[in-house]
Structure formats: C-alpha cells, structure tokens
Image (cartoon, rainbow, N blue to C red):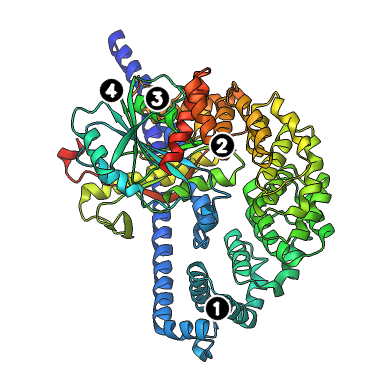
Amino acid sequence: MSISTLFVEGIFWSVGIFIAVYMSMSIGFYCFLLLLSFLQLKKESHLNKLEKLDEYFDVNYAKPVSILVPAYNEEAGVVETVRSLLSLKYPQLEIIVINDGSTDATLSTLIEHFQMAKIPKVIRKELPTAAIKGVYQSTIIPFIYLLDKENGGKADALNAGINMSQYPYFCSIDGDSILETDALLKVMKPIVQSNNEVIASGGSVRIANGCDIQMGTVLQVRISKKPLVIMQVIEYLRAFLLGRVGLSKFNMLLIISGAFSVFSKSWVIKAGGYSADTVGEDMELVVRLHRLMNEEGKKRRIEFVSDPVCWTEAPETLRNLS
Amino acid sequence: MLDQELKYLISLIFAISAVLTFLIIYLTASRLLERKNERRKEWYFRKFKDEIYNYLLAGEKLSRHLIPICKWKIEAMEHVFLQYIKTAQNEEMLMRITNYAEIYLLDYYRKLLCHRKWSIRINTLYCINEFQLTALAEDVESLLYKKKNYTKEEYFEIYKLLVKKQRNCEQMVCYFAKIGDIFSEFEYRRLLMEMTEQQIEGLLFALHKLPYSLQLSIFDVIGIRKLESCIPALEQHLQAKDIEMRLRVLKAMSQFPHLSNLDQYYRFAESQHWQERLMFAKLTQHFNEKEAIAFLLRLIKDPSWWVRQQAAKSLQMLQSGYQMLESIIKENEDPFAADMAKEILRKADNK
C-alpha cells in the first residue's frame, strides 16, 4: 500500500472513530435523559391532577409578576396578544408592552385601543438600553403600560421592560403564544413553593394546530392530520418531555422557552440582563444565570413545569417552515 | 476486524431499537387501558349524575348502584366529589361527601396509606384532607411513628390533617421540630392559616424550638390574620439579632390597625438597613400626624429608592399629605424626592 493510501485510510478511520465516539456519547446521554424522564413521569402518572390552584391565587401567597411584551412592527396582532393576557388568572400583575422603535402603526394602535395617556414615570435604569421616548398608561385598564423606545432589538426591549417593571418577577412572552388562563399560576408554582430557591421557571410549549381553541382557552386537545405538523408535535414532545424534564431534575436546564418563561428580576439584573449581541438571548441568559449561581455559591434552581402552559401555531407547509 | 466492529455496531443498534420498541408497546398498551378506564368512569358519571347531584345537594338517598364495590367505581366517585368540592362551597354538601366516604371508603384508604407507590399514597392523603376524614387522623398520625422516610409532599398532606385535629400545642411543636426545616415558607403559611389563634400563640411561645422558615411564617401569618393577642409576644422579637426576623415582625406590625408602645420603633428610622427604614416608613401610619410628617419628610430624601417610594406613599395617606407632596415638588430641593412625589400623586389621581 502506498503512503498516500495509508494516509487517506488513516483520516477516514480517525473521522469515523470521532463520529462513533461523539454519537455514542450523545445517544448515551439522551438514553440517560429518557430513563430519568420516564421514571419521573411514571412516578407522576397516577397523580390526581385536580389539585387546587386556587390557593396560589390568594394574594397573601402570590408573588406579583410583570409581563413584558416586546413588539416590533406588530400592529396586526399586538392588540389581540395584550387582550389574551387580560384573561390570565393571577392576583397581581402588570403588562408592559415595549414598542421597540416600530415603523408601522404599533404605537398609535395601542394608544387608541387601550386609551393610553403619556405619564411622567420614574424609571430606575439598572440595565443599559436604547433611549426611552415616553411611557404611557392605559386610562381604562391601569395595569397596562406602554414603553416607547428607540429600536434596539428584542433583548434591548426586554431590558427596558425590566428597568420599568415594579415587581420582583417578570415574564417574557412571544407575540404569537396562546396562554392557558392558569398558565401564570402553574409556572409560578415552583417559585412560590420553593422559598426563593427557584429563580426561573419555564413551561411546556405544545402545538395548537388541530386543537379546539376558543377565547384563548384550549377546549379539546387534538392532533393535526398533516404529517409535517405531526413531526413537529413529536419533536416538541421529545424536546420538552424528554430533554427538559430530565435536565431539570439535575438543575442542568440550559434553556427555558422564550415563548413563556418567568425570571427573578434581581437575579437577571445581577447577571447583566439580556444580551443584545446574540441570537438566542433566552438561552444565553439562562447560561449566565447558571454561572452566576455557581459563582455566588448559592443553592438556586431553574425549573421546568411539565404541564402544558403555552400553545403555539406550528408552520403547516414546508415553505412556512423554511 | 471491520466485520467485527460492524457486528458490534449492528448489535448495539438492535439492542437500542428493542428497548425503544418495548417502550412504545408498553406506552401504547398503558394508554389504551387508561382510555378504557376513563370511558368507563365517564359512562358511570353520565348514568348517575342526577342521583349524585340530588344526594349531595338535597340529601336524597343513594341507590345500591352508587355503592363503590370495585376500584374504578371508587375512582369515579372520588373524581366527582373532588370536582364538586373544587367548584362549589357548601357545608352540607361537604358533610354528605364526608359521610359517604366514612361509610364506604375508610378501609380502602387505610390500606392505601401504606401502598408502595408514592402517587397512590399522595392521592389517598389528598382525598382524606379534601373529604375531611378526621376518622383517619390516628392512622395518618401513626405514619409519623413508622421509620419510613416520606417525601415532602406526603409530610405536607399529613400535617394538613393533623393541624386541624391536634389541639395540643406541645404536640404540634414536637411534630414540627421532628421533621426539621423541610417545608417552604409558603407551605408553612398554608398550614398556619388552618390553625386556631390559640395554636399559633402556643407556637409563638415555643418559637426557639421550631424550624427557621416556620418562625418567619408565624410572624407573617400573625400579621395577615391580625391576631392582636400575639402582639406582646411578637414585640419581644424586635430585639432579635437576625435582621430577617426583625423585618418580618415590623411587617406584621404594620398590618395591625392599632399599635401602642410606639417609641420602641423610633430607632428603625435611623437603621443602617434600608429594609428596616422602609418598614418604619410604613409604620408611621400609627403615629400622630405631626410626628409622622417629621419622619417622612426625612425619609423621602433617603438614599434608597424603595424607602423614598414608601415614604411618599405614607405621606400621601396622611390628611395633609397631599399638600406636603405638592410642596416637595414646588421646592424641588431634592430632585429624586420631587420625582417620587410626582409619581405618587399621579397614581393617587388615577385611582
């Protein structure tokens, strides 16, 4: 055999072994997560889920939450998004819509629809953000605020919302998420129960295609007949019920869904807020929170709630998916 | 050599596929059985819902069909009763559910309290609490004396029943000291809200024997429930070395409509901890107006944003508070104080 043949064979072997080792580790890790999640879900499978969430609704126990809704050029859907949040069952919350320098009629639509008036609000600037142009408050629903600012991206908008929020916890949501009425109660449950040990909590996101949804409530869960949607359903179930349940058990959750998640404001501010120069700002924040927890040496956790709390529409065609 | 490695790889793939296939078959079979059970229970409820309704709300006699002779019928009746309890508040209805459970379900629950599956034990304890089966209190209490280690959720359900049944404070103190600090403050508050004033007073006198989170929760609940008989004992803890304890006592005090011995609070106006200054600003509602204004005009210029905010809120609640806040805005000596005054006045105008 010539030297060049031997060299090429050697490269193929090395690459092959590398792939084999990597795949073995990856499959082995996911098999381990599968086993953990299987045991955890089996343990809870016979549990009576009729537990009363009403006790968490008592204002003496509930922790107030600020819901942050970043909006950029969303004149078509922003009013519906805010209206759906009004049906959330929670004793004390405020809704802050952050208009991130929209070039369409997002600002005027919100001002007109919720009859908002400009207010001289004092904002503590704990995270650096783009300049604030003005703060508005709804005259008909006083806990809805609108923060108008220069464009800076989703992360910058969320940081501005954090600066303005008055409550110790904030919740970030996507504009197209459909939340169940007790979603906030379910996602706050680990935080309320944990003596401030849980600093962030995320819920399971499920695909709404095919389900019977009326007035922001899922009346019946059904599966779509389209193969592309079914594939996405399976992938969501794998990602949430296999990966995240297993990782949450060991406090190794590196991402909680930006579609609906709750964070402790003080910890996020200590970690430096959302990073404006990255694409997956929610994952990046969670990783920094883990680092902060390790550096401070405090016993804190980031948890995942396996109950579905958030429903989202999945693309039904390859074109939309791409 | 390559053949051997390929053989290993293929065997591994087969092994993993076999495990996954087994899992799919197991999950499918479990789900089919579960659906069959659910359909049976739904049929049972649809057939007898009028009879159940008449029994629970009008006290009419139940037919023999509603005597739960098998497991799925018991589960169906449990589910129905829990739904009624969740959606309707009616003492007579709850009494009839308790009577039914005491006649037909006591032995069943007694057996399930010792089941090997955690979820079954938790469901049983949950039903015992919801159906208020105090007849099983001794069986539940005896669980504490077995050497087994229960999970936090089980201890919580056990203690939920015992706080209602047990009136002896010393025994309650022993129960709480026995398990250590396993509950969160939220869980302790839930337990304390079920207790009588005498029980809480008893715990307050034995505070040093109790877990730390329970101590803090006791202060919180005294404030929430405004238990005035506990004020003298509570005031003694204002001298505590632990700042969190002092803060909880101050917070509890701020929730009472009337307080005496106000001079013991003056030192908190100059505290090095902003949290104590904030609580003091809240407590000024109990002072006479002249005294309160003097303190609050100082605190509205405090270096801490939170103290300034509370001082402005407390000022706004005074009779001449509105004028005080307007004069702070006009004078504008301290721009931060003026900003806070504007914010509070704006919020007051919006209400």
Point out residue A179 in the picture as x, y percentages from the top left corner: 36, 49
Query: Where residue B277 sits: x, y (%)?
Result: 66, 30
Q: Is residue A106 above or below residue B152?
A: above
Which labelled disc corresponds to residue B320? 2
How many C-alpha atoms fall within 10 Å of the one at disc 1: few (<14), some, or many (≥20)? many
Q: Secondary structure at mark 3?
A: helix
- Quarter of the rendering containing residue B314: top right
Circle 3 sits on which residue?
Answer: A17
* Label 2 close to label 3 by CB (< 8 Å): no
Query: Which residue is disc 4 drawn over?
Result: A151
Chain letter of disc 1 in the image: B
Measure how far apart labels 2 and 3 are at the Cα level.
Answer: 82 Å
Image quadrant occupied by the C terminus of chain B: top left
> CA–CA distance between discs 4 and 3?
48 Å
Determine if residue B12 is in view.
no
**Residue in front for this viewpoint, B236 or B28:** B236
Query: Which chain does tag 4 point to?
Result: A
Q: Is disc 2 placed on a helix, strand or loop? A: loop
The reply to the same-chain question for discs 4 and 2 is no
Choose between B79 and B30: the one closer to the eye. B79
Local crowd at mark 2 within 10 Å, few (<14), some, or many (≥20)? Answer: few
Residue under label 1: B93
CA gap, disc 3 and disc 1 = 69 Å
How far is the residue under mark 1 from the one under mark 2? 52 Å
